[in-house]
Image (cartoon, rainbow, N blue to C red):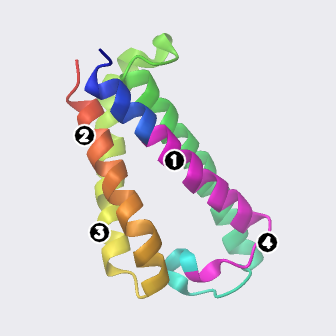
Amino acid sequence: MIPPSTIAAFTFAVLIAVAVCFQIALAAGRPWGTLAWGGKFPGRLPNRMRTASLAAALLLLALGTLVLARAEVTLPSLYPLARTLIWAVVTYCALGVVANSLTPSSSERIVWLPVTILLLISSLVVAFGP
């Protein structure tokens, strides 16, 4: 039987991969600005926000790596660090839920609020796992 924390880690990884691809697409110039950054930049993001999207993609990759390490799915050398930093991931996800709940962009709220809720739940399962 697969432990719940492993299932949660893979769920987190898939959702984070979607978010990373989205941020990379924004950084590459896709006209999806209404779905990010509070919807302040409809269409193609300005250069500074494209850079921010690239930075966000890197941060999300790091979060996914920590979750997978904490669930002992990959990178066993990171496990001791991930046992502590998982709570930073949980906090980031909780803040994401709040931010996506309050965004003035209804499109962003519809798309990303369910994703951030699932990220929060799955990160909590991993955090409380063995």
Badge 1 density bin: few <14, some 14–19, many ≥20, Cα 10 Å: many
Looking at the rendered structure, the secondary structure element under dot 2 is helix
Q: In terms of sequence position, does the residue under pointer 1 or pointer 2 come before the other?
A: 1
- Indicate the position of residue 76 as horizontal and vertical percent values: 47, 11
Is 22 covered by the magenta stretch? yes
Badge 2 density bin: few <14, some 14–19, many ≥20, Cα 10 Å: many
- Indicate the position of residue 111 as horizontal and vertical percent values: 46, 71
Looking at the rendered structure, the secondary structure element under dot 1 is helix
The residue tagged 3 is: 98
In the picture, the quarter occupied by the N terminus is: top left
Looking at the rendered structure, the secondary structure element under dot 3 is helix
Q: Residue at x 30, y 27 (%)?
A: 5
Alpha-carbon distance for marks 3 and 4? 27 Å
Three-letter code, disc 4: Gly
Alpha-carbon distance for marks 1 and 4? 20 Å
Above or below: residue 128 compared with residue 2:
below
The residue tagged 2 is: 124
Above or below: residue 9 compared with residue 117:
above
The residue tagged 4 is: 29
Three-letter code, disc 3: Val
Mark number, residue 67: none
Q: Which residues are magenta?
A: 12-34
Q: In terms of sequence position, does the residue under pointer 4 or pointer 2 come before the other?
A: 4
Three-letter code, disc 2: Leu
Q: In terms of sequence position, does the residue under pointer 3 or pointer 2 come before the other?
A: 3
Alpha-carbon distance for marks 1 and 2? 15 Å
